[in-house]
């Protein structure tokens, strides 16, 4: 017994030493708890020390972002900004948040307001400003209408350098549909700065990649919105991000009805006809904003919204499990299970921009 374990020890040490001597790239992985979710950072690299240093750096950056940009918790700069907006006052904020808000203003406009991060009060009214899933009946119609009448919009925000104010006191920013895509993009950039060029950062299926996994691309799975497992897989190339909005993660359930956490800013009610929307883009923030806007647009209007936002690679799954794809997405995606129906849309990206 002893002999055998000694042999095993020698064998193991020899293997590790050989691996270290070979100095070829290998898989490394670390998981962080950030933005209230698990962030898996994987790299295929021969620089493990740099990888671990980069991950420590990312952890600090993301914890700070989480504190500063939380919509309803703590005393971060977003909470203070929303308070200033409500009071009709101006507030000096960080250059990074200014940049984020300018970007989100731009995407809100491109989406015709289907992505509208100024509807924080409506999101709060539906109970989604809480760690626990909300329960009980939906809010009263007159409360919803009351908030719709105040028409909060990103266009109400006035930028004077880093000093921001709002022409409309009902504007309350919620970056829940957008900040994750921005952060994932940033993570890939930061890893590159540490010399890690082949990596994947994945927050519950939302991800960005760099490089490849040796001589093959990173292959990722898109979660099935209605069942277990993966609906499709797709090879992702250097710098691309895949963002999915789904009504399966967070919802309010009452009387057998599920109310999704994605709201239609026009009606004030949760989206009904989309189970999930996925967008692939080099801009993580754009893909995230678009996945939300496409969920709101639904089967009738998703092609127009994708085109207006400049996206060619989009997939929607409706509540009956039917799949809608742009031709470009159809070419690269591989389905893992039998599907009720696949509808290839018209790519309008050349026309209506
Ligand atoms: P997921 O969290 O499933 O990835 P999203 O990216 O769509 O989905 O983010 C949903 C969050 O975005 C909600 O919890 C809410 O905070 C916010 N939100 C909901 N509806 C909208 C909307 N129409 N525009 C902008 N933000 C929204
Ligand atoms: Mg989103």
Image (cartoon, grey):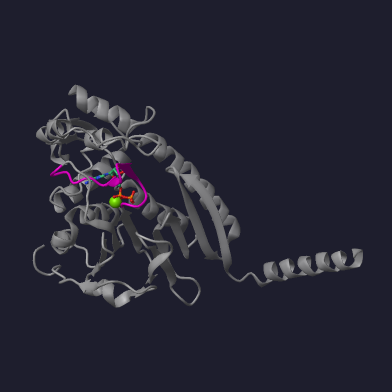
Residue 153 location in percent, x, y?
Answer: 15, 39
Quick one: 13 or 176, which is closer to the camera? 176
Say which quadrant the C terminus sits in: bottom left
**Residue 118 visible in the current orientation:** yes
Figure quadrant of residue 5: bottom right
The answer to whether residue 255 is magenta is: yes
Say which quadrant the N terminus sits in: bottom right
In the displayed structure, would residue 99 be above or below residue 49?
above
The answer to whether residue 282 is magenta is: no
Residue 41 location in percent, x, y?
Answer: 50, 56
- The residue lying at 73 percent from left, 67 percent from top is 17
The answer to whether 182 appears left or right of 220 in the picture is: left
In the displayed structure, would residue 193 be above or below residue 147?
below
Residue 163 location in percent, x, y?
Answer: 23, 31
Figure quadrant of residue 148: top left
Magenta residues?
247-267
- The residue lying at 35 percent from left, 61 percent from top is 241
- Extreme residue toward the front, this view: 255
- The residue lying at 59 percent from left, 59 percent from top is 48
């Amino acid at each position: 017994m002893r002999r055998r374990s000694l042999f095993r020890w020698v064998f193991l040490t020899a293997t590790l030493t050989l691996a270290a001597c070979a100095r070829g790239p290998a898989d490394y992985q670390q998981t962080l708890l950030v933005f209230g979710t698990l962030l898996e950072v994987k790299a295929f690299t021969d620089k493990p020390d740099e990888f671990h240093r980069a991950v420590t750096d990312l952890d600090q950056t993301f914890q700070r972002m989480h504190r500063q940009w939380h919509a309803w918790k703590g005393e971060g700069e977003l909470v203070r900004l929303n308070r200033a907006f409500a009071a009709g006052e101006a507030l000096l904020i960080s250059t990074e948040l200014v940049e984020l808000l300018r970007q989100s203003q731009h995407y809100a406009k491109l989406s015709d307001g289907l992505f509208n991060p100024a509807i924080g009060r409506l999101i709060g009214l539906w109970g989604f400003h809480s760690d626990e899933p909300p329960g009980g009946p939906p809010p009263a119609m007159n409360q919803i209408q009351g908030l719709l009448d105040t028409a909060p919009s990103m266009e109400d925000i006035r930028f004077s350098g880093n000093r921001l104010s709002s022409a409309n006191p009902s504007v309350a920013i919620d970056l829940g549909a957008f900040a994750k895509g921005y952060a994932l993009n940033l993570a890939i950039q930061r890893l590159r700065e540490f010399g890690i060029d082949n990596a994947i950062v994945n927050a519950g299926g939302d991800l960005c990649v760099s490089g490849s996994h040796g001589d093959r691309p990173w292959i990722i799975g898109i979660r099935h919105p209605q069942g277990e497992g993966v609906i499709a897989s797709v090879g992702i190339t250097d710098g691309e991000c895949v963002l999915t909005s789904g009504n399966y993660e967070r919802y309010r359930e009452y009387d057998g009805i599920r109310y999704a956490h994605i709201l239609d800013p026009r009606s004030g009610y949760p989206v009904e006809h989309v189970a999930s929307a996925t967008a692939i883009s080099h801009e993580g923030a754009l893909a995230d904003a678009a996945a939300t806007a496409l969920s709101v647009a639904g089967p009738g209007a998703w092609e127009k919204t994708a085109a207006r936002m400049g996206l060619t690679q989009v997939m929607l799954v409706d509540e009956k499990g039917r799949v809608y794809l742009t031709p470009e997405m159809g070419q690269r995606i591989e389905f893992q299970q039998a599907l009720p129906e696949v509808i290839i849309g018209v790519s309008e990206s050349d026309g209506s921009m």
